[in-house]
Image (tube, coloured by chain):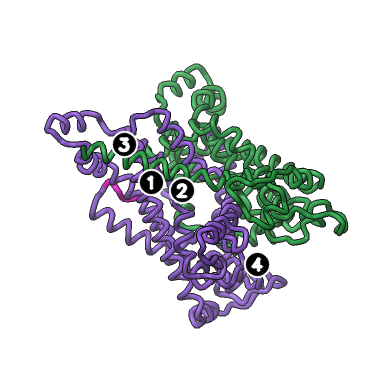
Amino acid sequence: MRERLFLVLMYAVLGAFALFCFIPFWIVFINSFADESLLQTAGYQLLPSKFSLHAYKFLLSGKQVFLSYGITIIVTIAGTALGVLLTAAYAYTLSHRKVKYRHILSFLTFLTMLFGAGLVGFYMLIANWLHLKDSVWALILPYLLNPFYAFILVSYYRTLPYELNEAATVDGANDLYIFFRIIWPIALPVIATVSLFYALQYWNDWYLSLLFIDNHKMLPLQMMIRQLMSNLNVMAYVSGSQTQYNVVVPTYGMQLAIVCVTIGPIVFVYPFIQRFFIKGLTLGSVKG
Amino acid sequence: MERRRRFGGSFVHELSRNRYLYLLALPGIAFLVVFAYMPMAGHLLAFQDYRLSDGIWGSEWVGFKNFEFFFNGKDWLRVTLNTVFLNALFLVTGLGSAVVLAIFLNEIRNRLFKRITQSFIFLPYFISWLVVSMMTLTLFSTSEGLINRALAALGYEGVDWYLMPSVWPYILTVISAWKIAGYNSIIFLAVITGISSEYYESARIEGASRMQQMLYITLPLMRPTVMILALLGIGRIFYGDFGMIYAIIGDNGILFPTTDVIDTYAFRALRQLGNFSMSAAVVVYQSCMGLVTILIFNAIARKVDADSRLF
């Protein structure tokens, strides 16, 4: 009897938490289709009574959303590709028992997780020394090597039999060949997991654009959300033209619409990538 | 002399013998040098009266003046306490709710229910803090927010949430648990799945109930992982989650008394006041406190449970 009650409690708690996680998504999604006048008078609702596509039409009629989408896609693709290549290669050296200085390298990598460089030095490096303000490189370069993902790869490489390496060496292959032709294909599932982590980080980042992007043509999607949330003159911002007073600007609706446009791709691929993430997380935690 | 040559020789020998392996690591090493170690020179600015025109080597050295200025003001205590208090709340609720979710998920036998639940609680992890801040606005906005509308429908007065500093530590805590609990619960679930079923079988033979199995087998065996995550969290207790707090609170000065953390303070000093030296002093203070904390807690963890230490 007590067991049964406990089981019911578990279902209730899990169900409630799942609902609690889902509701904010629902509110944003359904209200982005709500009529602007309804949003202004009745506020956000669980089920709006009047629907319209006005917010989306307005958002997509301007250039800004396409510019921002382009920047975000470029940064995500280039950042993920470069980051994964760099991390996978770097981690391979850290894991290789032939490498004498691997412990020093590992320690120097681990140290950066504990003792950060700090905001000021980082800002000066990008802005004043490398002169990367208002450049896509400022959005790509700083995240290329994530120590945590490197260590996930190191722990995976260590599980591979060393005989693979020896056999290839006997056959006359050098380490570059071994890495790209033998290790990389075997490690592909883990590399794919790490790629997803990098892609998510690049897609969702707004810290770098907050610090280094002033030119609105270079703003990624996330910063566009921020601009739309704080910028009252939405019309001028989105279309780049002078404000037209004869059109009602759907301010509330557009804030929600841009959020949906931003998370749309993630929610769309979510069912496919969720398992990968879980696999990657499991690997990372078993390493400990 | 002999020794030195042999050392230099072995260094060059090692590099040339494994030249392809070091070549593979070269971009990563270059990254660490440029993006992780070079910016540490920024800490020097804390001891200078930095002027952009004079550069880091041309500016005047002023010793601890920036620190004196920071510690003489009333802000330092506020931001320190806020940072530690908020992070402690986030850590306890984030890990606590994840442990509960993982244990419950593990007990659930209905596959469909389990999969749907897991998908939903993991979903918030995938979105950015700016999206979260928009969602927060839809709930807490004074005139349009769902909560105030619900209160009005029930006949209560609406609350000006964005003007009330006292409630935000708790709202932020709930949001933080909302976003991270699903992610952490998957880590814990992996640990639980890794527990040998023999423990449970012998416990069942001894007549242990499900609740007893949970309390005396599952929980103790999860401890090392919980401890490691807690240690990592404690190590970062002086680092506020800038992305989260700046997205949700932004420049709303009314909420600063309870939500301004060291990171947002340093950010404002740098970006809005343009005071590089002051910002650097704050960051040096933060780094030192962080390092001391992690050393202390790692030592404690080593005493309590050798498997749980970080290094």
Mark 1 or mark 3, which is nearer the start of the sequence?
Answer: 1
Mark 2 or mark 4, which is nearer the start of the sequence?
Answer: 2
Q: Element at badge 2?
A: helix
- Mark number for residue B98? 1
Residue A123 in picture, x, y percent from top left: 63, 60
- What chain is tagged by disc 3? B
Mark 2 or mark 3, which is nearer the start of the sequence?
Answer: 2
Type of amino acid at the residue the image marks with label 2: Ile
Q: Quadrant of the C terminus of chain A?
A: top left
Q: Is label 4 or label 1 in front?
A: 1
The magenta stretch is B307-311
Q: Is label 3 or label 1 in front?
A: 1
Q: Element at badge 3?
A: helix
Chain A as rendered: colour: green
Asked if the residue at tag 1 contacts the one at tag 3, i.e. Cβ–Cβ closer than 8 Å, the answer is: no
* Point 13% across, 29% down: residue: B205
Q: Which residue ends up furthest to the top in the rendered image?
A: A171
- Give the chain letter for purple: B
Alpha-carbon distance for marks 4 and 2? 29 Å
- What chain is tagged by disc 1? B
Residue B179 position (above or below residue B271): above
Asked if the residue at tag 2 contacts the one at tag 1, i.e. Cβ–Cβ closer than 8 Å, the answer is: yes
Mark 2 or mark 1, which is nearer the start of the sequence?
Answer: 1
Q: Is label 4 or label 2 in front?
A: 2
Residue marked by disc 2: B180
Prevailing secondary structure of the magenta residues? loop
Q: Are marks 4 and 3 on the same chain?
A: yes
Residue marked by disc 4: B271
